[in-house]
Amino acid sequence: MGRTMLSERLLSFRPVAAVARGTVLLLLATQAVAAPAAAAATEPNASVAVVAAAPATGITTANLKLRTGAGTTYRAITTLPKGTRVKLVAKKANGWRKVAVGTSTGWVSGSYLTLSPKATTNALGYVSRGLTFRDKGPNKSSRVVLTFDDCPKTLAAFDAVLKYAHANNIGLVIAPTGACISSFRSRHGVNIAARARAKGQWVINHSVDHPDLRPLSCAAAAAQLKGTGVRSNYGRPPYGAIDGSVECAYAAVGMNIWTWNVDTEDWRVKSRALTVSRAVNRASAGSTVLMHMQWHGFSPEAIGQIKAGLGQRGLKLCRAYRGTDNAGAIIPSPRYLPSSLPC
Ligand SMILES: [Zn+2]
């Protein structure tokens, strides 16, 4: 599960970087970016379920030296074979982890660890080992939710999808970065988040400029969540990359984590047909499907094909927002998602 979560790629930002000059450095200088001051940190955070899972263990992803201190200059105690399960004891700002293996304790580079959170129950009632308890977010229905991250290539492409979703009573989840929202505001004078909500679509946070939040301190990661970007009670960590300090940051800003359980890898396949067939064939009742606004799943044609393909499998898509009773005309969706999405 952890590896799947990490399959999203920063590469997929290229179309945006090419058109939004000011954004390029922000997007590339991931870990060094100082997040802008929290302009709207006073937003209310009512009815928020705080997830309190802490990673307990990790597994080495390479043969890894266990050292006496947090850096390669420290003496190696032993080499841990790839695939060794370790207990996590402490973490340094430089990403090194203090771990326990059998009777030994020492430090390893966190870059070569896959972390597995403890089994836990969150306030939404999902219980699971690992990350699966939040992969469906607030969708407790059997309908499938299509989610699109990052940034659309053009305003026309974005509007075409919104128009189609609205006309066909489909409720998508959009997760644009703050950098994306800023770039559309400066180029077109529009707020794409507000534009999506006006069509009954759901909009969640995706950080300011898409860093892997794990190497950041809890405070620095929290700044990524409350800086320029979507205000909501749900957010998706870039790359689905989560560890204890990332969870600390989400809890600090009162935001729930919503990942996914179907990854189309649209950024890798670069094909509408493959993206569509993966979404159709990998989804099951209640799935959250990951795609990106800058790739081939994000078009009226692709979404129409996914809807039709799911229909043949007896699955339906989440509907656009019509109020909590799910009756009547489509109305603007709230920025704070209900604890049970009226799909
Ligand atoms: Zn992303």
Image: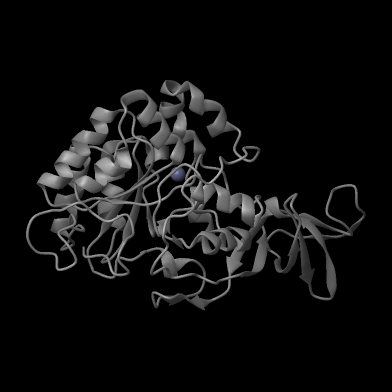
Q: Position of residue 11 (x, y in %)?
A: 49, 34
Q: Nearer the viewer, residue 335 or 138?
A: 335
Q: Position of residue 57 (x, y in %)?
A: 66, 69
Can residue 259 be seen at all in this image of the molecule? no
Left or right, 208 with reference to 335: right
- Quarter of image, res 339: bottom left
Can residue 24 be seen at all in this image of the molecule? yes
Q: Which residue is drawn at the image coordinates 28% and 43% (left, top)?
A: 194
> What is the basis of the colouring in this image?
one colour
Left or right, 189 with reference to 143: right
Q: Position of residue 209 (x, y in %)?
A: 51, 39
Figure check: 51 above or below 243: below
Please, which residue is most extreme toward the front here? Answer: 42
Please, which residue is most extreme toward the left here? Answer: 328
Figure check: 230 above or below 98: above
Figure check: 29 above or below 76: above
Q: How many marks?
A: 0
Quadrant location of the C terminus in the rendered image: bottom left
Q: Nearer the viewer, residue 101 or 117?
A: 117
Q: Which residue is drawn at the image coordinates 56% and 27% (left, top)?
A: 25
- Quarter of image, res 65: bottom right
